[in-house]
Amino acid sequence: MKRSCLRLALPLLLAGSIPAQLSAPRIGVVRYANHTVRVVYGVPSNFVIADQMLDSADAISFSNSGGLVAKDGKIQIFASGQSTALSEYTSADSAPVLNLDGELTTAVAWLPASHVLLHWTGQSFAATNVIPGVITGAVSSLRLSGPDKVELLATQSGGEVLKVSISLQTGNPISSDVLPGVQGPAFLQSNFVVFHDDQGLEIESANGLRHTLPMPAADLAAERMSNDWLHISSASTKQDWALHLSNTALDLSALPGSAR
Amino acid sequence: MKLLFLAAVFCAAIPAQTLTFYIHDTTNATPDQALSSTYQFANTAEGGSTSVTLKATNSSSSAVFISAIYVGDAANSSGANPNFTVTGAGQSITLAPQASMYFKVNFTPASMGALVGYLQAAYQTQQNGCSFTSQNPATQCPSATDSVATLQGTATAPQLLLSYATSSGNVPMQPNAGLAVNFGNVSTSATSSITFTLANVSLSAATVPSVSLQTQIYASSAFSLDTSKLPATLAAGASATFTVTFAPGQTGLVTATLLVGTLTYPIQGTGIVLATIDALQISYVDQTGVRTLPQAATPISFGQLVAGTNVTTVLTFTVTNPSTSYDAVDVPAVTVSGTGFSLSGAPAGPTSIAPGSYISFKVTFTPGPSGNYTGTLAIGSRQFSLTGQSVASPLPSMSFQVSANPLVSQQQVNVTLQLGSASTIPAIGQLTMQFTPSVSGVSDDPAVLFLATSGRQLQVSVAAGAQTAIFNNQSAIAFQTGTTAGTITFTVSFPNTAPYSQSFQISPAQPQITSATAMRQAPNLVVTLNGFDNTYSAGKLSFTFYDTSGHAITPNGIAVDATSNFHQYFFTNNQAGGAFALQASFPVAGDATQVGSVAVTLTNSAGTASTTQNFQ
């Protein structure tokens, strides 16, 4: 029965009406140490760094749908392919933590100085005040984990990482758990936690399994390039990498430098 | 000037015995002996040399700055004495208290008989915080000149006699004579040679002294010397000859000095015009702009170049008929012969140069393999020898090694520049990579680059003693191979070294699908493929859909020919090489959720790639 339904549908495919749309494969968007922002094309281990997209940004997070950009005290949201911001939020925070890992409504930002969680409703930015003291340590990564819930990873003074869930409705904590064996700064990517230890770059899945990738540098920072790609950088070695990480992909490649 | 300085020296009061002098046995067989007020050299033949090594010790409790030790021609005189020299004495040397220095005094008689010289030392003593280098009289250190010893020696008859051949027989020569040996008037197209004879008139074998020509520095010499027939020693009563040739390339008087050991003999000759072509004034300018008037006796040097560097030496010649000439000068031809030398810009065939006019041309030396190169420039009957040298690179042989060989597309690979042996010198060079696609109609792949610079050039260095070049302290330099079949060529260029290149092939390969997704986006099924085709020839696609139970849905294998799509993508404003993202959308009239997966094949000229994706 099911097959017969499809037989009715599939003949449409035989009419030659299948357009094969071709384009340069887009990896994502990278912000280099010199703060320039560039689009990256290619396939793993083969990247082409395109011309400058933004001349400067203090922080970025891009998904396949768009991007969050912090620059000069403003947080802007862009739809993919658009050069004009959909909206912007003025903040005095000098070091906001951004994340956009899917549709634009997944956009969320942590403003550490003002203790504000910012998210994009689809029409505007909404700010949620978080009671000071609820989030301790330095937040290195966050994401929208439900319609009204945000998960944050915060590095404590001893290096351990606390995973805190906050309600966007109230700003109150929902849960707070130490991630065992995880050293900060840590980053959330898909169903994984990414961090660095003496072994290298650790990729820990939700079931606790770890995969280790050799990584010479220790002072790592991460920014999201797209849904499945993270930009990993080291200020000390002046190196950049692109980590392709999803439920079906795990690949680490060096990213061409910014000397263009 | 020196006299003025010494006069000033005498004005200052210096305590006696600041410096003490000793006779030093260089074999250390006997202890140093104090130098007495008179030193007697052994009898020495005129033209010969006898030496004594002396030690000067600072006997004072203050530092002493010795400005000069010399032999004067009279007591308290700094006038040069031709029969004595001081060698090995460091000028402007500071001796700490009780420190010593060694030097040699040589008795080199230029004439026979009893000869006298006066050994003197000029110095300053540091006292009361004065400064050796001060120009201020108030802070200058007191200075003095000590008479060290009177030197005596007797010059005996010379062992070797020099003479030269003339049409009327051999003429004995006196050293340091005022009258020069004259080669006479010689056409600028001709040469004149004189054979000199060195005869040992003693009863024992004698060492043949060095024979050389002293000419004006930084200028071409009209004289050349051939000492190939001179032996190292002459037996008693034996003789040997050498030849000096006068070959003027310019008109006018030319002088030089013939040096035989320590003895000097002036020589001269005059370049004149006999034929009209002799009047031509010939000069050349090198690449730095220095102008030289060549003399035919001295080869025109094109210098030393490193083999294989593609560096050449170009000299620009100008041949002028002086405005004082009465007639035009006919030059039958200008030619250059000799491997490595070439002529350009010269008039073809015979040419006539009017008075006051000139012609110019270039002669280029392009070095081949290492070795010496000679040639001849002929301007009619005016001939000049050409020389050049090609030398091997100072760096050892080089080779590139890649961490993955053979190279394939979509790789990040390390390249290392390996030297055949440890470098004896430090060097900084440019490493470049060039990519030549083998795909017709494709000129480049932007993904082929060095990761560190996002470019195709970077600076590498080689440390002395190292066997690899480094960039950012790393010998392994990472690069991307791109997604286009072709050839990557690495070239490294160091100064004074021939560029070294090595190529690596990337062969055409079947398409690679690096990632794929299958999505239900009602009413469509959307299949996306990311990958690359390094042949740029992909086009044939096949999609086979399966239901959620894994049964193929009829019809099996929906063929899609996307050749034109791929061609347009690859060859129109290509920004990603052979990398592509393909999206195929299949409208479905029925329940799309019943479609479970899709198997896709993609074919290019080298093969077929496939992937199976479950719908999400």
Image (cartoon, coloured by chain):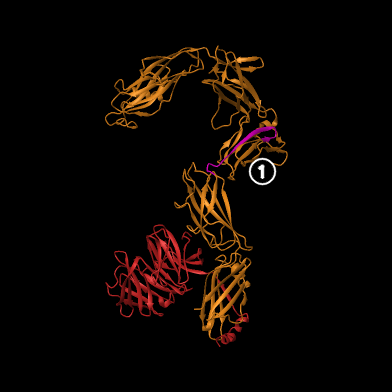
Chain colours: A red, B orange
| Quadrant that contains the N terminus of chain A | bottom right
Q: Nearer the viewer, residue B142 or B84?
A: B84
Q: Residues within 10 Å of mark 1 (few under 14, many from 20)?
A: few
**Mark 1 belongs to chain:** B
Query: Residue B452, percent across and down?
Result: 47, 57
Range of magenta residues: B377-396
Query: Residue B202, percent across and down?
Result: 55, 12
Query: Residue B46, percent across and down?
Result: 51, 15
User: Would residue B378 be counted in the magenta stretch?
Assistant: yes
Residue B177 seen in the figure = no
* Res. B564 image quadrant: bottom right
Residue B51 left/right relative to B291: left
Kindly identify the residue that appears in the image at 59 percent across and 22 percent down.
B230
Q: Is residue B589 above or below residue B74?
A: below
Residue B170 seen in the figure = yes
Element type where label 1 sits in the image: loop
Kindly identify the residue that appears in the image at 55 percent across and 51 percent down.
B491
* Res. A109 image quadrant: bottom left
Magenta span: predominant SS is strand
Residue A63 left/right relative to B178: left
Q: Is residue B516 above or below residue B5?
A: below
Q: Nearer the viewer, residue B347 or B499?
A: B499
Q: Nearer the viewer, residue B515 or A57?
A: B515
Query: Which residue is under mark 1?
Result: B345
The kind of residue on which mark 1 rests is: Gly
Q: Is residue B502 above or below residue B293?
A: below
Query: Residue B198, percent across and down?
Result: 59, 17
